[in-house]
Image: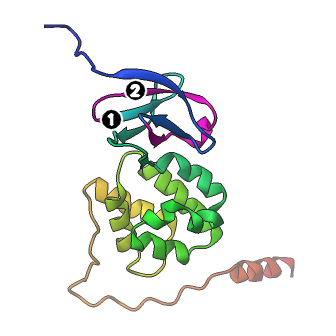
Amino acid sequence: MPAKEYECVRYETLKADKYGYVKVDLNLYSTSPRFALNRVLVKISYNTVEILDDERQLVVRHSRLYGQYRKSMKWQPYLNLMAKRPTALKYTSFYDQLPEEWKNYFQSCTVVEKSEALKLLSLILKEHDFSLITKALVISSEHGHPSVDAIKQVFYQLINGRGIRSEIKPKITLPTLPEATRGLERYDQLHKGGDA
C-alpha cells in the first residue's frame, strides 16, 4: 500500500473576474473580493471545487456543480467587505438568502450594529452554518433587541454545550435593598467640606 493517499484532483490556475468569480466547466464559483481580477489556484475533484491562495491555503470550498451556466456563491469571504458599507446590505442577493430572523434583526439595527453583525457573521460562517447563530439570535432577542456581543455570547454558550441558564427563583423572599444612587455628588460634598 502507498504511504500517502492518492488524491484524484486536478489543479488549474484561473483568473477571477471583477466580481471575484472563476469559471470551471462553464460554471461560476466565488472566491473572495481580494482576488478580483487576479489569478487563483483551483483544486477540482469529482465533488468539490476549492479556491486556494498563493500559499496553497484554502480560501473557500464549494460543492461541485454539474450542468452548465450555474453559480455557486459562498458569502463568508465577502462579509467583511460588506461591513464597510452596511447600508448596501439590503440590495445584495446575500440579504435575500438570509433567514427571516436575521432580516428582521438587520431592519432594526443602526448602521454601526449592522457593520458589527456582519463582522460576527463573517467570523462564525467560516466554521459553522446559519442554524446555530440564528438560534443564538432568537434566544438573545427574548428580552428585546440584542447587542452583537449578546448574540456572540449566546452562540458560544450553545457551541460549548453550556446552554442558557434559567432564572434562579429563590425559595425564601429576599430582603428589600436600598436604592443605589449614582454619581459623584457625595465626593463633591467631601471636597467642599475639605475647603472650609
Instruction: Judge by depth and name the residue closer to the eye, 39 or 194.
Output: 39
Q: Amino acid at mark 2?
A: Lys
Instruction: Judge by depth and name the residue closer to the eye, 61 or 157.
Output: 61
Write down the residue under mark 1: 48
Q: Tell me, yes or no, whether the two marked residues, 1 and 2, touch with CB atoms within 8 Å.
A: yes
Q: Amino acid at mark 1?
A: Thr
Image vertical order of residue 160 relative to residue 190, above or below: above
Does 86 appear in magenta?
no
Query: Which is more N-terminal, label 2 or label 1?
Result: 2
Find the magenta span and give its range: 26-48
Q: Position of residue 179 (x, y in %)?
A: 52, 89
Which image quadrant: the N terminus?
Answer: top left
Write down the residue under mark 2: 43
Q: Position of residue 128 (x, y in %)?
A: 35, 50
Identify the image's colour scheme: rainbow, by chain, secondary structure or one colour: rainbow
Q: Quadrant of residue 190?
A: bottom right
Image vertical order of residue 96 relative to residue 19, above or below: below
Q: Position of residue 169 (x, y in %)?
A: 25, 83
Instruction: Judge by depth and name the residue closer to the eye, 157 or 51.
Output: 51
Please report the residue visible at 76 percent of the width from the left and 80 percent of the height from the top: 188
